[in-house]
Image: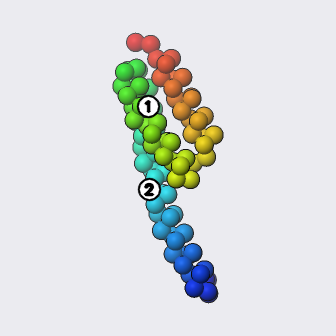
Amino acid sequence: MANTPQSKKRARQSERNKDINKARRSRIRTFLRKVEEAIASGNQEAAATALRAAQPELARGVTKGVLHKNTVARKMSRLSSRVKAITE
């Protein structure tokens, strides 16, 4: 357990940041799930719209330190190529 005032404060901060990061990660996953569902439905227009909505959320995850930038770049690239591959 934390003994010094500094370590007690760090424990409080890490607990708070854990909750915030958990919410951010959940929000990002929700946007990704919407893109996946739109791709599965075969509607390219809906998939492209969902992808455009998800991209800023993914980028925000990088700036907030929730996700690594290469992970997000890879996800965006793969999703965009899958959206482009949809033919109606």
Q: Can the viewer see residue 33 in this picture?
A: no
Give left or right: position of 77 versus 33. right
Which corner quadrant of the image does residue 76 belong to?
A: top right
- In front: 60, or 85? 60
- Which residue shows up at 42% across the image and 43% down it? 30
Q: How is the image coloured?
A: rainbow
Q: Which mark is residue 23?
A: 2
Inspect the image, locate mark 2, and give the three-letter code of the amino acid beneath it. Answer: Ala
- Which residue shows up at 63% across the image and 40% down it? 70
Q: Position of residue 68 (x, y in %)?
A: 61, 46
Local crowd size for mark 2, using a 10 Å CA cut-off: few (<14), some (14–19), many (≥20): few
Give the secondary structure at mark 1.
helix
Q: Which mark is residue 51?
A: 1
Q: Position of residue 84 (x, y in %)?
A: 49, 19
Cα gap from disc 2 to disc 1, whole angstroms: 20 Å
Give the secondary structure at mark 2.
helix
Compare marks 2 and 1 and give the one earlier in the sequence: 2
- The image shows residue 65, relative to residue 45, as above or below, that is below
Q: Quadrant of the N terminus?
A: bottom right
Q: Position of residue 63 (x, y in %)?
A: 53, 49
Number of residue marks: 2
Q: Can the viewer see residue 61 in this picture?
A: yes
Give left or right: position of 32 versus 5. left
In this view, which residue lies farthest toward the top? Answer: 88
Q: Position of residue 9 (x, y in %)?
A: 54, 78
